[in-house]
Image (cartoon, grey):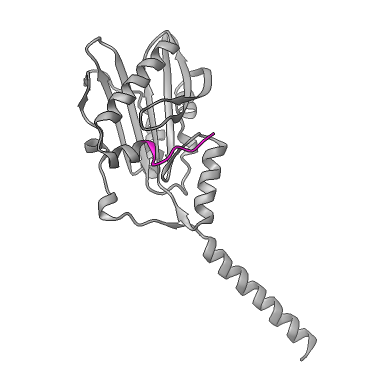
C-alpha cells in the first residue's frame, strides 16, 4: 500500500474516532417524565406550622436587566414572604432550571445582591440540620444602608444538595461525563435582622417546619435525594 495513502487512512480513522467520542460525551438533556413535572407554586405550601404568607412584604427582586437573564436561564421561580405568630418574617426565593448546562453560578446571591448595591460583610459555609439529613448551605450577610440581611441558601444539582463553587462545578462535570445534563435548584432564605446568629436560627426553624409538611417527592426536589458531602 502506498505510504501516503496509508497515512491518510489512519488520519481519517482517528478523526472519525474523535468525532464519535465527542458525540458520546456530549451531554444529553434528560426529557422530564410526566410524574417529574411540577409547579413550585403548588409544591411549596402557603401555610405550615406557625407560618403563613405575608403579601405585604416582597423579597428582593432583580433589576429588569437581571430579570431578563433569569427568565432565559430558569424554568420556574418563586418569591414569597412568610410571617409567624411572633411577627418574625422570612423571605423565600426559589429558582429552578431544568438544564444546568446553563450557568446557575452567575446568579448566586453573592452576585445578585452586590449587583443591586449591597455589600457582603459575612460569608461562610454551614450545614442546616433537618431530620431528613444535613443540608450544606452558605451563610451570608448583605448590607445596604440600614438594611442588614442575613441570608441562608443552598443549591441542588441533579439529585444532590451541594456547595456552591468548586463542588457544584465538579458535580455538573460528573453528570456531563455520564452523558446527562442535570436539573438544578437554588433555594434562598433571608430576613431583615441585626443579629445574624439569631436570624440563622429562625431560618433553620423555618426550613424544618416547611420540610416536615412536604410530600416526600417534593421534599426530595428541594433538598436532594442525598446530600453531597463537602
**193 or 59: nearer the eye?**
193
Residue 119, compared with residue 174, is above or below; it is above
**In the rendered image, which quarter contains the C terminus?**
top right
Position in image of residue 42 (x %, y %) = 21, 37
Identity of the residue furthest to the bottom in this view: 1
Position in image of residue 216 (x %, y %) = 28, 39
**220 or 150: nearer the eye?**
220
**61 or 65: nearer the eye?**
61
**In the rendered image, which quarter contains the N terminus?**
bottom right
Q: Give, as a single range, the part of the protein colored magenta.
A: 223-230
Residue 118 in sight:
no
Residue 137, compared with residue 24, is above or below; it is above
Position in image of residue 203 (x %, y %) = 36, 20
**228 or 123: nearer the eye?**
228
Residue 227 on the magenta span: yes
Residue 84 in sight:
yes
Quarter assignment of residue 184: top left
Quarter assignment of residue 21: bottom right
The residue sitting at 44% across, 47% down in the picture is 100
Residue 189, compared with residue 180, is above or below; it is above
Residue 40, compared with residue 189, is above or below; it is below
Identity of the residue furthest to the right in this view: 3
Tally of numbered tags? 0
Q: Main secondary structure of the magenta part?
A: loop
The residue sitting at 25% across, 17% down in the picture is 83
The residue sitting at 33% across, 20% down in the picture is 205
Identity of the residue furthest to the front in this view: 131
Position in image of residue 145 (x %, y %) = 44, 10
Q: In this view, does 87 lie to the left or right of 74?
A: left
Residue 115 on the magenta span: no
Amino acid at each position: 500500500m502506498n505510504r501516503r495513502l496509508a497515512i491518510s487512512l489512519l488520519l481519517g480513522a482517528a478523526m472519525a474516532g474523535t468525532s464519535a467520542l465527542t458525540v458520546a460525551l456530549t451531554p444529553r438533556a434528560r426529557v422530564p417524565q410526566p410524574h417529574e413535572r411540577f409547579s413550585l407554586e403548588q409544591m411549596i405550601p402557603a401555610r405550615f406550622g406557625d407560618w403563613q404568607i405575608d403579601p405585604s412584604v416582597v423579597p428582593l427582586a432583580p433589576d429588569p436587566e437581571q430579570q431578563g437573564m433569569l427568565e432565559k436561564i430558569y424554568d420556574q421561580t418563586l418569591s414569597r414572604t412568610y410571617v409567624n405568630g411572633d411577627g418574625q418574617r422570612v423571605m423565600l426565593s426559589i429558582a429552578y432550571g431544568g438544564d444546568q448546562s446553563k450557568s446557575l453560578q452567575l446568579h448566586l446571591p453573592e452576585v445578585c445582591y452586590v449587583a443591586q448595591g449591597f455589600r457582603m460583610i459575612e460569608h461562610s459555609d454551614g450545614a442546616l440540620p433537618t431530620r431528613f439529613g444535613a443540608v450544606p448551605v452558605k451563610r451570608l450577610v448583605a448590607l445596604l444602608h440600614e438594611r442588614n440581611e442575613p441570608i441562608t441558601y443552598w443549591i441542588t444539582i441533579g439529585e444532590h444538595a451541594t456547595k456552591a463553587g468548586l463542588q457544584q462545578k465538579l458535580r455538573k462535570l460528573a453528570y456531563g461525563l455520564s452523558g446527562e445534563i442535570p436539573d438544578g435548584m437554588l433555594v434562598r432564605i433571608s430576613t431583615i435582622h441585626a443579629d445574624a446568629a439569631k436570624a440563622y436560627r429562625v431560618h433553620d426553624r423555618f426550613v424544618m417546619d416547611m420540610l416536615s409538611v412536604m410530600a416526600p417527592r417534593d421534599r426530595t426536589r428541594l433538598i436532594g435525594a442525598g446530600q453531597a458531602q463537602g
